[in-house]
Amino acid sequence: MSIRLKISEKGLIYNNKTTMKIELKQIKVRDIVSGYTNNEEEGVTGFNGLLNIRPPYQREFVYKDKQQKAVISTIVRGFPLNTMYWVKNEDNSFELLDGQQRTMSICEFVEGNFSMEFIPGVQQCFHNLPDSMQEKILDYELMVYICEGNETERLEWFKTINIAGEKLTDQELLNINYIGTWLSDAKRKFSKTNCVAYKLGNKYVKGSPIRQEYLETALDWISNGHIAAYMSKHQHDINANELWLYYQSVINWVETTFAIDTNAKNYRKEMSGLNWGNLYNRFHHKMYDASEIEKRVNELMANEEVTDKKGVYEYILSGEDENIACRLSKRVFSNTDKRTAYERQKGICPITGESLPFEEMQADHIIPWWKGGTTTLSNLQMISKLANARKGGK
């Protein structure tokens, strides 16, 4: 099927149908930065309060220092920036549909919140620049498409134009579809730099809050992987307290079960990034002796046969399930030891009694490591592939 997409004077044309009214405007930097406010909790606005720079579907500010400075350098040199997109609301206010990172970089610089090296070895903020240079920046014209359409059209357009830019994460795309009071509260708790979720669980959760990775992790835990379904169900809740209380329960359970003290002396790097929500859902109803668990963790971490150190926690919580134990040790016998064992057995599988070529046999621990066996020649036997498959973790 052929799909044609273009912008005309009447608006966005999709397969020969006008779906959104779009008008190209040239707007000066001085107008956008006028009345600029950046309140982490209440939002970010500019254009004399008429432009909502960070609508609910937008990601948090993620530009690094180098990227911010590249935006300002582009303006100073008079080069064109990529086109931006605004949405016009019924009350004649605007939402920034695409271009948040560039817009905030400009506003933050003019506000004096970071400096640049225009002269080698000299850092200058906006207010340190000569008047002529300040005026040049303020008079720079940004190319802005102003779009009018219903909410569905706007959000679909948002997803479309972001395909060519910095790729949105899966959670950022989901946020677009479930705007509401619940999402706003969830983002306050899980999506801000140094947010409460980060402060509580940064030893155990990987990722960046502002890229929605903490929110995604908590949602994955509470929903058992059905994030969209959970967000749909709770979209219009007045707050995200259920998610926040659950997240706190998981982190508190981890620190209680593994006796993590206030100084985190027995915290181990292997605890970072584990699926703690899954482990909590499966095992939090059981009673554990934290001191005994710590002793066992020590033993397994020191055991050179245990190559999957992260798997130790699930193994202990499960009551040392042998099927899980099979995944912990990835140590293998050398080809020399395999050949020695094969010759020692005269090519006969000790389990089936078959006489087989070397290539049709596999190395096997006579005594599994969790029963005290080691990856040494004395604990090696060569058995048929069929016997090895049947033996599994037994």
Image (tube, grey):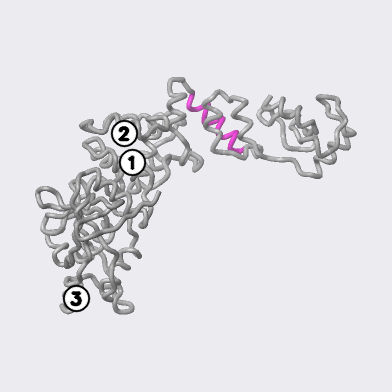
Q: What is the crowding at mark 1: few (fewer than 14 residues within 10 Å), some, or many (at least 20)?
A: some
Lower position in the chain sequence, tag 3 or tag 2: 3
Q: What is the crowding at mark 3: few (fewer than 14 residues within 10 Å), some, or many (at least 20)?
A: some
**Residue lying at 34% horizontally and 29% vertically, measured from the top left:** 246
Q: Quadrant of residue 387?
A: top right
**Left or right: 12, with 332 as reference point:** left
Magenta-highlighted residues: 289-302
For the residue pair 282 and 51, the one nearer the viewer reads as 51
**Residue lying at 10% horizontally and 52% vertically, measured from the top left:** 92
State the residue position of label 1: 174
**Residue lying at 73% horizontally and 28% vertically, measured from the top left:** 367
Q: Is mark 3 on a helix, strand or loop?
A: helix
* Amino acid, disc 3: Lys
Q: What element carries label 1?
A: helix
State the residue position of label 2: 231
- Residue 34 position, x and y percent, is 12, 62
- Residue 9 position, x and y percent, is 20, 60
Residue 136, disc: 3
* Amino acid, disc 1: Leu
* Amino acid, disc 2: Met
